[in-house]
Amino acid sequence: MEAGSGNFADLTTPPEQHAMTRATDTLSIAAVERDTGLPKDTLRAWERRYGFPKPLRDAQGERAYPLAQVDKLRVLKRLVDSGHRPGRVAGLPVDRLRRLAGAGTAAGAAEPADAEDLGALLALIRAHQAEDLRRALAQHLLRLGLAGLLQRVIAPLTVLVGEAWSRGELQVYEEHLFSETVQSLLRQAIATVPAPADDGAPRVLLTTLPREQHGLGLLMAEAMFALAGARCVSLGVQTPLADIVRAAAAQRADIVALSFTGVMAARQVLDGLAELRAALPARVQLWVGGSCPALHGRRALPARVLDSLAAIDPAVQAWRGAAR
């Protein structure tokens, strides 16, 4: 969220992959989706738009991905999850991609925590020690502050959890345990952020479109908006478009902020944003963020794309400056 040849492949590779992996060292598109966490639609879209990956074809004419390309796709997934645009990194050699991934998240974001610290947190998740995980995160919160916790610990840890899940090293319930522990901690931390002292703060309505059920990224964005001095109202996940429009009017929202992961097809994302933009008053800005590839392609979007959590504060300050 590897396969190889030889004796160990027979022990670690799913049966449906054995013949192809031993014969040609390639994986099917379904196997690549499981291995990397990249949806099939995304793999096809990147192939069409950016010329990578470049799959071979098996005897049945189906896509067959060399293992070297799968390895590069794993690194690309990490970079896109960190806020890099796929069009800007897909053509780079894998060694440069690894250097980028090791250097932290997108420009402007804080450096991630020490790998040993992140590994210890991941070990607590694997051991199902929710209370110890919460205490460890709370200690990071005290040391780094809320913004530091989000950017240096939770964001990179979320990527590690997703990668471990996609490789079958974490079960779904373990990923849920992590998500619930983090969300509980963040809600308490957000409640301690002082309300804006002036009337010039933007009113931000946060939610996700229908079919986008992941709420952790939304909560992380809410915390960064609150720290930036915005007045936040969250509707949680999967709000119907008509209700987003009604809520924006009722809350007198200046900004509607949406979070996306890779679960929605690009067409659903683009159509939903276009429909929502047309339904909202012109004065209400539409901001979007997350790891969904549809947000970071070449196509113009009817929304402002925030490439990382670190982009939220300067965007809010720019809004304040323009509103004066």
Image: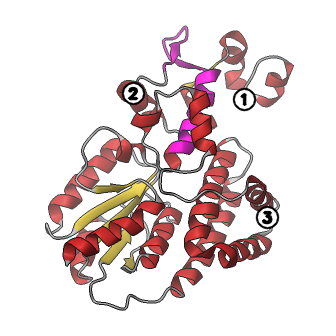
Write the start and end of the magenta stretch as one range.
54-79
Q: Is residue 171 above or below residue 76?
A: below
Q: Amino acid at mark 3?
A: His
Q: Which residue is mark 1?
A: 14
Q: Amino acid at mark 2?
A: Tyr
Of marks 2 and 1, the one in the foreground: 2
Occupied quadrant, residue 228: bottom left
Which quadrant holds the N terminus? top right
Q: Amino acid at mark 1?
A: Pro
**Residue in the image at 39% along x and 27% along y:** 50
**Residue in the image at 69% along x and 10% along y:** 23
Q: Which residue is mark 2?
A: 50
**Residue in the image at 61% along x and 38% along y:** 99
Numbered mark located on residue 76 in the image = none
Left or right relative to 265: residue 76: right
Q: How is the image coloured?
A: secondary structure
Q: State the SS at label 3.
A: loop
Q: Which residue is mark 3?
A: 128
Q: Is residue 148 above or below residue 111?
A: below
